[in-house]
Image: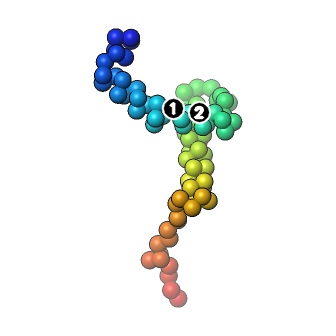
């Protein structure tokens, strides 16, 4: 593994991983999730999907509240009577 990590390609991949993936796990842990409450790969996969969905929804809500994201509504769906 040490030899592999000395290669320039491996360093570039690991560098991107630190920026893209690792902060999300830290944010999830600081929000209170510390372990799974179920057993089995399928159940754990479902629980982790739920945790990730909640994390993404929280990020969207924060963006809307901070004014970084403005929700747009499609007026074509409005039906006039």
Q: In what element is the residue under mark 2?
A: helix
- Residue 11 - label: none
Q: Is residue 4 left or right of residue 80?
A: left
Pinpoint residue 3: horizontal percent, then vertical percent: 34, 11
Q: Is residue 24 visible?
A: yes
Residue at the bottom extreme? 81
Q: Is residue 67 left or right of residue 3?
A: right
Crowding near pointer 1: few (<14 within 10 Å), some, many (20+)? few
Q: In what element is the residue under mark 1?
A: helix
Identify which residue is drawn at 60% across, 54% down: 62
Pinpoint residue 75: horizontal percent, then vertical percent: 47, 77
Identify which residue is drawn at 52% across, 64% down: 70
Residue 12 is drawn in which quadrant? Answer: top left
Crowding near pointer 2: few (<14 within 10 Å), some, many (20+)? few
Q: Which residue is mark 2?
A: 26
Identify which residue is drawn at 36% across, 23% down: 11
- Residue 22 - label: 1
């Amino acid at each position: 593994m040490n030899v592999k990590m000395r290669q320039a390609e491996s360093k570039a991949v690991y560098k991107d991983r630190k920026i893209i993936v690792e902060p999300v796990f830290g944010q999830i842990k600081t929000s209170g999730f510390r372990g799974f409450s179920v057993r089995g790969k399928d159940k754990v996969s479902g629980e982790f999907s739920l945790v990730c969905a909640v994390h993404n929804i929280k990020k969207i809500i924060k963006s809307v509240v901070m004014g970084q994201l403005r929700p747009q509504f499609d007026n074509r769906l409005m039906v006039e009577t």
